[in-house]
Image (tube, rainbow, N blue to C red):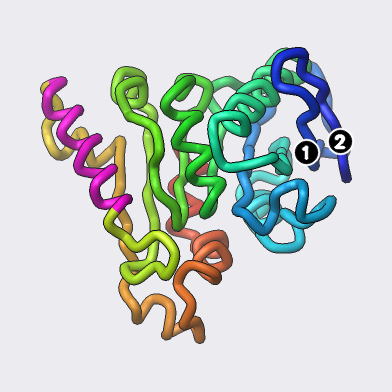
Amino acid sequence: MDNVFQDDQYGDIHYNAYIPKAYDKRQSYALYITLPGYQGLYFQGVGKNLETEEFGFVSQNYNAQMIVLAPQLEDWDELSANQTIALTKYFLKHYNIDKNKVYISGYSGGGETLSWILTNEPELYRAALMCSSKCDGNFNKVVKNKTPIYFVIGEEDEYYGSTPFKEAYQQIVSLYKKEGLNQEEIDQLVILDVKNKEYFTSQGITNEHGYGGHLFANDEHIMGWLFNR
């Protein structure tokens, strides 16, 4: 469970990996990386990300032959972003990965990490899913590379609120409009999905942030968007 990639620049990178049993280096595979929230960071204990989040397991429903990485990072800042980028590049180099099918998601603090990844090297990923979080970086390279992003959060998220995602969405829309894209074209590249209270209460949930990861991971519309790009 506790695999370690030792990177010369960014140190030990702890991660769990699912490699299909029938992996054949002559065939190309999709790759999915799921970034944990605070409760799944490495200092919380080995495998805590798998105990507290379902994204990695649910992803296999969409493609059972997909390689899945679940890093246990050190923080939710640029260090973890750089570690994730390094881990991604390692797998791209050492496994037969279809570079047009590299997907990534981040929940809570993992979404903050993902925002730094997208600030620096969005071209590595086919699409990105950001759940219940906020954005710390910028979207200049995202727009340049036209990397699709899906933002999803509860309207009354107890930790972040929904305003940061709304602002991030508007920033991206403005950048695309400056590039000459119309709204229909923009809608193919960025989605803002703010869930109302009923989305949660109808499923027996009152804590929008803490259980958002559970509901979003099991929402076929959200996860289907990511893996059907």
Q: Is tag 1's residue or tag 2's residue first in the polypeptide sequence?
A: 2
Question: Answer yes or no: do the residues labelled 1 and 2 have beta carbons within 8 Å?
Answer: yes
Q: Which of 23 and 202 lies nearest the eye of the viewer?
A: 202
Numbered circle sitting on residue 3: 2
Q: In x, y percent, where is residue 18? A: 79, 41
The residue segment tinted magenta is: 164-179
Kindly identify the amino acid type of the residue bearing the numbered disc 2: Asn
Where the N terminus falls, by quadrant?
top right
Identify the residue shown where x is 20% and y is 43%.
170
In the image, taking residue 151 as reference, residue 116 lies left or right, namely right
Kindly identify the amino acid type of the residue bearing the numbered disc 1: Tyr
Q: In x, y percent, where is residue 162? A: 32, 60
| Residue 104 sits above or below residue 125 on the image | below
Where the C terminus falls, by quadrant?
top left
Identify the residue shown where x is 76% and y is 55%.
44
Whether the magenta-drawn stretch holds residue 151 is answered as no
Count of labels shown? Answer: 2
Numbered circle sitting on residue 51: none
Identify the residue shown where x is 13% and y is 38%.
183
| Residue 195 sits above or below residue 164 on the image | below
Whether the magenta-drawn stretch holds residue 178 is answered as yes
In the image, taking residue 53 as reference, residue 104 lies left or right, namely left
Mark 2 neighbour density, 10 Å: few (under 14) some (14–19) many (20 or more): few
Q: In x, y percent, where is residue 211? A: 54, 71
In the image, taking residue 200 as reference, residue 20 lies left or right, namely right
Residue 154, quarter of picture? bottom left
Give the dominant element type of the magenta stretch: helix, strand or loop.
Answer: helix
Identify the residue shown where x is 64% and y is 30%.
84
Q: Which residue is mark 1?
A: 15
Q: In x, y percent, where is residue 6? A: 82, 22
Q: Which of 88 and 36 lies nearest the eye of the viewer?
A: 36
